[in-house]
Image (tube, helix red, strand yellow):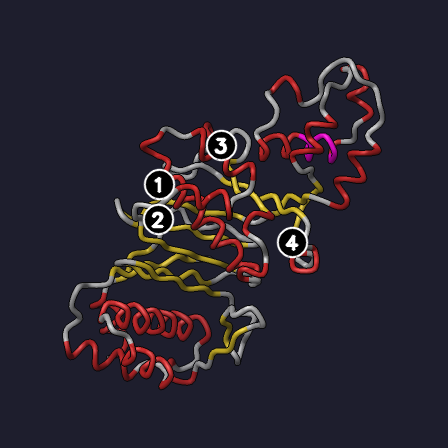
Amino acid sequence: MITIQVLQVPAVVPEAYWDLFLSSVSEERRAQAARFIHQADAYRSVLGEVLTRVTLSELTGLPRKELSFSRNAYGKPCLVANPKIAFNVSHSGDWIALISGGTAELGVDVEKIAPIDLQIAERFFSTQENAYLAEQPAEQQVTTFYRLWTLKESYIKAIGTGLSLPLDSFAILPSEGSEGNKVGDDLQWRCTQTGHTELTGQLEQGEPSLDSSDVFRLTDRYDGANAGNIDAAHRNALQVASDAGGMLDAGNVIGAGDTRELTQWRTASSQNTRIMHHRFYSQPLDAQHMLAACAAKGELPKKPEIVTLDQIYTKLM
């Protein structure tokens, strides 16, 4: 079972607690904590490892202090003794988040919401995501930016490639019909990945899709009588591509008037955009922090488990 745990970092950690927490992490972590100028940074770093050790010890049955960590070529952490145990940790502002459990890759990201120049989205978001952001009411655009940003971060952390995978090479957007099919108070999300099969080719993925330019070329209206010639996978992928790209209205999925074959579609679908099967979670933790999580397989929880400092201290004693 996949769990998402969140721990709120206090302004001051009691000295007895802090001494125990420091003794529970690696020597490298203690040295890193000593170098931080701001104590809040040391708290987040140490408590992130403490929460990870406590949780993974319970998952594996190994003593906390015997857990040893390594990183892949892109910096994603894993357990040396059991690299198949999936987990991921993030911290920002007042919160630490840990995702663990299940049998497939996991990613999590938490970000403190702060004023930001939204033009940065033009550098890092896909065309479809920028269009979605621009459609939001002005008062919701900063929150929407952080929602998309954390979703994207959770995805690249799950697949373990870091920023080697360009952030504008994939789009994470509300899935078809999600306004009427919500998880908790939130939308359901879908990811479409364009290119970079050298990084994502081994991932769990679904039927091919199209990039936005192909959607424009291939949907300038197919005759309703010829719609039956389109197999179900291509029909579904074309619908998904239109959803992700925001290019088509409901009546334009298979329109009327053009009877050309879908050769161009099949070429594009095999080379360009793929619909990823990853599941996503996105919710604000509070008015100032956004949380997102991603799982390659399995069901994500509907809400995170709140862990307290006292609970962590008690488990360490």
Residue behind mark 1:
143
Which numbered disc covers residue 204? 4
Q: Residue at x 80, y 17 (%)?
A: 258
Above or below for 63 versus 248: below
Q: Is residue 103 visible?
A: no
Label 1 with label 3: CB-CB less than 8 Å:
no
Q: Residues within 10 Å of mark 3 (few under 14, many from 20)?
A: some
In this view, the mark in front (2 or 3):
2
Can you give x and y, in whole percent of width and height, for residue 263 in the image?
Answer: 84, 33
Q: Which residue type does callout 1 highlight?
A: Thr
Label 1 with label 2: CB-CB less than 8 Å:
yes
Q: Residue at x 51, y 38 (%)?
A: 129
Element type where label 3 sits in the image? helix
Q: Residue at x 35, y 40 (%)?
A: 142
Element type where label 2 sits in the image? strand
Sequence-earlier tag: 1 or 3: 1
How far apart in space, not on screen, are marks 4 and 1 (Cα)? 30 Å
Q: Which residue type does callout 3 highlight?
A: Ser
Element type where label 4 sits in the image? loop
Left or right: residue 220 compared with residue 306: right
Residue behind mark 2:
290
Residue behind mark 3:
178
